[in-house]
Image (cartoon, rainbow, N blue to C red):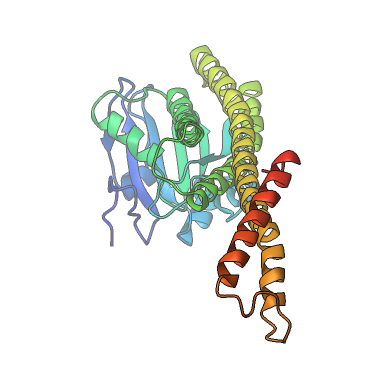
Amino acid sequence: MAPQGTDDPTAADPDTGLIFARVLDGRGGAATIGWEEARHWMPREPQETLWMHVDRTVPCVDDWLQSELGLSEATADALTADETRPRAFREGDALVAVLRGINFNPNAEPEDMVSLRMWARGNRVLTLRRRPLQTPSEIAETLDRGKGPKRTGDLVTEIIEQLVTKIGSTIVDMNDKIDELEDGRGDHDTDEILTIIATIRRNCLGLKRHMSPQHEALLQVSRESPEWMSENNSRDIRETIDRLKRYLEDLDVSKESALVLQDDINNRAANLANHRVYLLTIAAGIFLPLSFVTALLGVNLGGIPGMNDPNGFWILTGILLALTALQLLVFRLLKWI
């Protein structure tokens, strides 16, 4: 069993679901506390904030949300449901958000985005996940170094910013890969290039599917920001929304670039195949009359010209060569070759 309050983002207490809990001190640092302390936590100083990161798949989490935090059944379901699209809403002075982040887990595709649920009110922030996500553990590390967010609004803003930033870095990586393929850099054959392009297009579609509603969710956060979010927090979220909008536009460009590159490769392959078929057709056209003549003379019937002439073979060879030269001249005049 993982210890309560562990810093390991992949380990959760199987009895409580707690991954870690931090008490922000209002100066950029935080203290680590366990489950029992977090359950009964009360701020000693006005600037303190409790942040709990929980695995929502643990069965007792849903009951805990309703019985101890006093959340409505609908809100608890939104925070623990297996499948839901990104969205955000106010519940009194609390902010509830369902967001998505890039999946950096082993053997995962970027478009298979990981859901992060968040509930924040006053001096409490609760985040819930099913699969490991980098953002919470990285923010916890900055708090441990004394350089993290200071208040509830700062923590919520930092989580949103990091989720969007990682989405942007993934899009940049895809664009770099497309540029590499367009410039012909790298040792890839045609089939491998088409496979890479198909993966990029699939990633673009998957990211767009989650990022479009996420953009709407962040707009909702900006429009209905609670009182505990400062003006700086609201400004930072607006900047994040603007960046996410640019990323959506970049996704469209990446998708179109991949499609153009795929069409170009397919057209080149088709042209190459057509050219090879054309050369084979020319060769067949050259050898067809030669094959007819040699087949006619090879029927082994009496009366074949030159059958008894010792120079008959060489005469026939000369005639065939002359016929070939005449064909090549005619093909040249017709601009077939």
Return the residue nearer the eye: 268 or 252. Answer: 268
The quadrant where residue 235 appears? top right
Return the residue nearer the eye: 20 or 99. Answer: 99
Q: Is residue 321 above or below residue 262?
A: below
The quadrant where residue 223 appears? top right
Q: Is residue 249 above or below residue 298?
A: above
Outermost residue toward the right in this view: 334
- The quadrant of the image that shows the N terminus is bottom left
Return the residue nearer the eye: 217 or 121. Answer: 217
Instruction: Say how many tags the image has.
Output: 0
Determine if residue 264 is in view.
Answer: yes
Outermost residue toward the front in this view: 309
Outermost residue toward the bottom in this view: 301
Determine if residue 92 is in view.
Answer: no
Q: Is residue 162 above or below residue 229?
A: below
Q: Position of residue 179 (x, y in %)?
A: 49, 31
Residue at 64% from the left image edge and 57% from the top image edge: 283
Q: Position of residue 153 (x, y in %)?
A: 47, 24
Residue at 35% from the left image edge and 55% from the top image edge: 12
Residue at 70% from the left image edge and 51% from the top image edge: 327
Q: Position of residue 332 (x, y in %)?
A: 69, 41
Return the residue nearer the eye: 109 or 151. Answer: 109
Q: Position of residue 182 (x, y in %)?
A: 51, 33
The quadrant where residue 86 appears? top right
- The quadrant of the image that shows the C terminus is top right
